[in-house]
Image: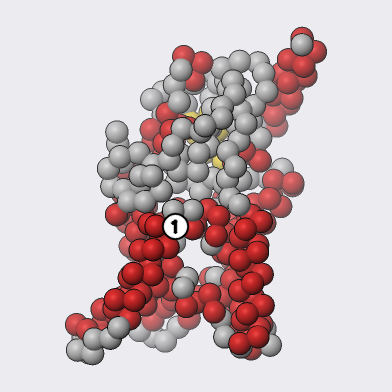
């Protein structure tokens, strides 16, 4: 199995990380990526009881990218995903070996038969994420401090790097060199559903993605039914996907709400039938007609 996309994600993640650290040398907010974080923006606004206008352009830029490309930040830019790609996680997700598991519930693929689309996986637990987000915002307002920054995986990555900097550059070791990495390991590798079901940043992304679904817009992987061999039993795209999305079975934007555009499915497809594109209206109409035809035949 090739892993060029995973290697590319690692390179992109490292570049972003190095760029953020370099920016920190000039005392810019980008040094911790907080200039791009909607959760950080909301927390700071409530904690200070004033709007941090200087952070608004970066936050809006991230939300615009999510609206156009979905949860692409999670796969390509987030330091948490970088660590998962390198060291493993998400059963399993490392430098070698596949990511994701075959969905437990499946239905006939839209490419395999003229019937309904496959049942999508549960995906992101938006309700849990919104509860976590709500609690964090309330606590931040009460204590006048952005509390999520204390255990945010992205913040912990930078905290660990600064702790290493203190040890090797300033020769000032501290307890944070032990505490930060342990917290990070616990969140990413013990609580395996952190990113999918707990991370409050994911709540913002999910809301934006659901908005674009309602508007009928979105760049997603699409399977070519003419060359797809899922009818012959191929489940490569469903098995390789870390979000348990069966690309061959999906025929609506809603099926791709958890997609991070990691492009593993595009790379792994044995017939190269998967391309990233805007949804085809013609395909959607054909799918609807097929569903109606299947219902009438019953």
Q: Quadrant of the N terminus?
A: top left
Left or right: residue 282 versus residue 93 is: right
Viewer can see residue 119: yes
Q: How is the image coloured?
A: secondary structure
117 or 133, which lies in front?
133
Q: Residue at x 52, y 53 (%)?
A: 196
Q: Residue at x 68, y 88 (%)?
A: 49
Q: Residue at x 53, y 37 (%)?
A: 245
Q: Residue at x 64, y 26 (%)?
A: 117
Quarter location, residue 153: bottom left
Residue 130 against residue 31 in the figure, above or below: above
- Mark 1 secondary-structure assignment: loop
Quarter location, residue 293: top right
Residue 7: where, in percent of width, then height?
31, 49
Viewer can see residue 249: no
Total labels drawn: 1
Residue 140 against residue 234 in the figure, above or below: below
Left or right: residue 206 versus residue 90 is: right
52 or 232, which lies in front?
232
Q: Quadrant of the C terminus?
A: top right
Q: Residue furthest right?
A: 296
Left or right: residue 72 versus residue 14 is: right
Residue 191: where, in percent of width, then height?
44, 57
Q: Residue furthest top?
A: 297
Residue 227: where, in percent of width, then height?
49, 19
Give the labeled residue for mark 1: 191
Residue 30 against residue 60 in the figure, above or below: below
């Amino acid at each position: 199995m090739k892993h060029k996309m995973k290697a590319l994600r690692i390179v992109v993640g490292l570049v972003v990380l190095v760029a953020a650290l370099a920016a920190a040398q000039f005392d810019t907010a980008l040094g911790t990526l907080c200039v791009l974080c909607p959760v950080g923006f909301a927390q700071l606004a409530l904690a200070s009881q004033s709007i941090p206008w200087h952070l608004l352009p970066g936050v809006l830029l991230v939300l615009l990218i999510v609206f156009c490309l979905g949860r692409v930040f999670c796969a390509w830019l987030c330091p948490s995903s970088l660590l998962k790609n390198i060291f493993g996680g998400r059963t399993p997700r490392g430098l070698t070996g596949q990511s994701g598991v075959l969905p437990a519930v499946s239905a006939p693929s839209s490419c395999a038969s003229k019937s309904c689309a496959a049942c999508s996986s549960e995906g992101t637990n938006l309700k849990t994420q919104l509860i976590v987000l709500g609690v964090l915002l309330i606590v931040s307002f009460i204590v006048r401090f952005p509390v999520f920054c204390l255990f945010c995986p992205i913040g912990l990555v930078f905290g660990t790097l600064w702790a290493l900097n203190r040890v090797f550059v300033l020769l000032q070791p501290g307890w944070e060199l032990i505490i930060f990495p342990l917290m990070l390991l616990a969140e990413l590798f013990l609580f395996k559903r952190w990113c999918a079901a707990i991370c409050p940043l994911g709540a913002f992304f999910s809301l934006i993605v659901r908005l674009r679904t309602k508007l009928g817009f979105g760049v997603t992987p699409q399977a070519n039914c003419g060359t797809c061999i899922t009818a012959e039993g191929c489940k490569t795209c469903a098995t390789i996907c870390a979000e348990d999305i069966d690309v061959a079975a999906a025929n609506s934007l809603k099926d791709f709400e958890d997609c991070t555009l990691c492009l593993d499915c595009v790379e792994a497809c044995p017939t190269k039938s998967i391309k990233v594109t805007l949804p085809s209206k013609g395909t959607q109409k054909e799918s609807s007609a097929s569903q109606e035809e299947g219902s009438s035949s019953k």
